[in-house]
Image (tube, rainbow, N blue to C red):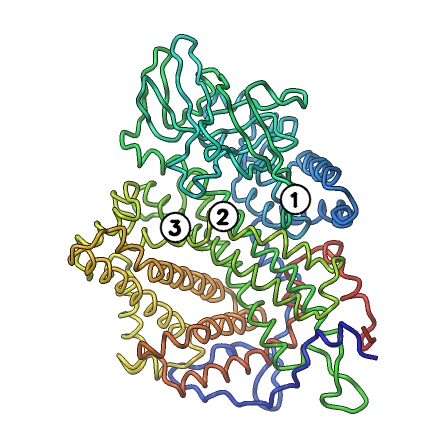
Amino acid sequence: MATFGDMATDQVPPIADELPTPLPETAPARVEDDAVHADDSGYRQPEVDVDALRTLLDGRYREVRDLVRDNLAEHAQILLDEEQMSTADFRERVRDVVVMMAETGQTGMGFPEEYGGDGDIGASVAAFETLAYGDLSVLVKVGVQFGLFGGAILQLGTKHHHDAHLADLVSGRTMGCFAMTESGHGSNVQALGTVATYDPAAQEFVITTPDDTSRKDYIGNAAAHAELAVVFAQLEVDGERHGVHAFVVPVREGGRVLDGVRIEDCGPKMGLNGVDNGRLWFDGVRVPRTALLNQFAEVTPEGRYLSPIDNPNKRFFTMLGTLVQGRVCVGGAGINASKVALTIATRYAVRRRQFEATSPDEEQVLLDYGMHQRRLLPLIARTYALHFAQEVVAGQLHDVFSGPGPIEEGSDEHARRMLESRAAGTKALGTWHATRTIQECREACGGAGYLSENRFAALKADTDVFTTFEGDNHVLLQLVAKGLLTDYAGEFEDMDQLGMARFVAGLAVETVVERTAVHKLVQSVRDLLPGGDTWDQEAGLLDPNYQLAMLRFREEHMIGGVARRLKRGIDQGMDPGAVFSRVQDHVIAAARAHTERLVLEAFVQKTAGLPDGDLKVALNLLCDLHALTTIEADRAWFMEHGRLSSARSKAISREINALCRKVRPIAVDLVDAFGVPEEMLRSPELLGWPIGSDA
């Protein structure tokens, strides 16, 4: 008898086998290099050592990730608690779990050893990413307490603040919040309305919320648990404003909200209801002069403002740049949440049978249908690609904030600008990928995927905001574009959108393109591949040089197009703001194309460095699948710009189908290598049936 699950599940019959277009001898298909286990057709199917692949994915922090996995398994009950408890009780449960995790050391790994940490930022990122396998309210509570609140005190404060607060916040004895966002200003942090006025007679700052548009909004930990807040406010000394600075402000004592502070609960949200988001107002709250987090600026007792960074815009961006770890962590969390969804959906797809496709006596498993492969396997490939891209940006974060490392691009400031840009782009693509992947996996599990116990309800609701917090993704891509157009020049910190338009208009367009270094890369690839200027039509589809060249060409063309449009508008006397608004879609597209190229490069470089064998073959299959589906997804652009013929476009689609059939036998191994704890998969309705049973 048909059920809701039957009707909602993929019903497409398998597609007929299609032979991929033969490849030129000069660009052999790398997927067959060094492979074993040949079949009669000559293709040799790799076998995957799941433990070896998991070790590769976990990287240098496997022990850290395993510690987090063990803690998640120990607290697996929280997945049920979310559904069964009231909001107030669940918030307390989440707080208790966070404090218990703090006792294991996993949440404080990025803090100095003298305050209870390990002094290892890379380990801290790895631990946070792995937390995304479990309840995401716990993850976000950890991010607020140790990443945002703790990170601000660590990076913006000095020894006085470290001694006063770090040991207690690392242990969870003191809970805090990060009060930056305001109702009326959103992502425009420089325009915050909260004011901190210095009173030299009392040697105190007076924190004031002038109006409701300046209230601190959506502040995690504020509604119930925070005792301290890092408050971002306009610093005013002797009537002069010096821009946004951060202050440590007490908001509760013994659970009681302090005088002059008003706190309001934000109420129910789409998800993450274990996190107590609140709104904050300050009515002349006084804090001592030492409450200013003074790593980059100081106010003397008599009221003199001092800073080693004279330019206020540069000072502002330097302060915000120290908080980039949160952006890196959110991107990684989104990618790991995708792994949970893909593990559930892929395992389900090899257990669930539906329709007699090849035999009247036996129904076919879902993953043997071509359309089901098309739905899930490219998402697995993209998840691997983003994993390795995240590995690069996390490594850069560790190097930049842990002293000299492999980044040798010039000054430390330049390395930080590069990190900020790459973190912004990777976070945007990683969190958008999570939203898309979780939805597709839910649909691929039919009606059973709609049940809360199968985790998709929480995954969808809890990750949806990832595209918004730690920077709206479209705003972040504008940051990426600014770096591309200015090459992280000295003027980078001073530029708003209008300044960028004026800056680019003052350059030759060719200079802008050359600054990206993409033009030279594309030319070198043209020289390398057969056919010169016809490289895009004659190279083998599975040649990584061809795949990268296509993405590099798109990036170069888009960046040049943005520069030309900006320059043309300014030259015609148009208002710079209006010019930028007109090209904003082009700006976002160029930044996304740039990040897509970085993601593929990270995957190609990772596979190239592996020893020959089945693991390398398997990852090359995934790399090819990711590269070709990326090109296929934007085939209209490539065809519009003369880089993809109709015949070659069809050949790419055929090759993708062939790659899906090759990945199909190892699909379960590929998701098992993510290492999602069995306790976190839950999903009895999806994964607990005997093979072939009815829904």
Q: Position of residue 317 (x, y in %)?
A: 36, 38
Q: Quadrant of residue 296?
A: top left
Residue closer to the observer: 350 or 620 = 350
What is the three-letter code of the residue carrying label 3?
Answer: Ser
Mark 1 and mark 3 in contact (Cβ < 8 Å)?
A: no
In the displayed orientation, state which residue is furthest to the front.
211
Please determine whether, in this image, residue 215 is positioned above or below residue 465.
above
Query: What number is the disc on residue 328?
Result: 2
Distance, label 2 to label 1, CA atoms, is 27 Å
Please determine whether, in this image, residue 461 is positioned above or below residue 297.
below
Q: Position of residue 246 (x, y in %)?
A: 44, 28
Q: Position of residue 306 (x, y in %)?
A: 32, 21
What is the three-letter code of the residue carrying label 1?
Answer: Pro
Mark 2 falls on what kind of element?
Answer: helix
Disc 1 marks which residue? 268
Mark 3 and mark 2 in contact (Cβ < 8 Å)?
A: no
Q: Quadrant of residue 452?
A: bottom right
Q: Going from the N terminus, do you reach mark 3 or mark 1 first?
A: 1
| Screen quadrant of the C terminus | bottom right
Q: Count neighbours of disc 2 (C-alpha within 10 A) and say few if under 14, some if 14 to 19, many if 20 or more.
A: many
Mark 1 falls on what kind of element?
Answer: loop
Mark toward the viewer: 3 or 1: 1
Q: Going from the N terminus, do you reach mark 2 or mark 3 first?
A: 2
Mark toward the viewer: 2 or 1: 1
Disc 3 marks which residue? 421
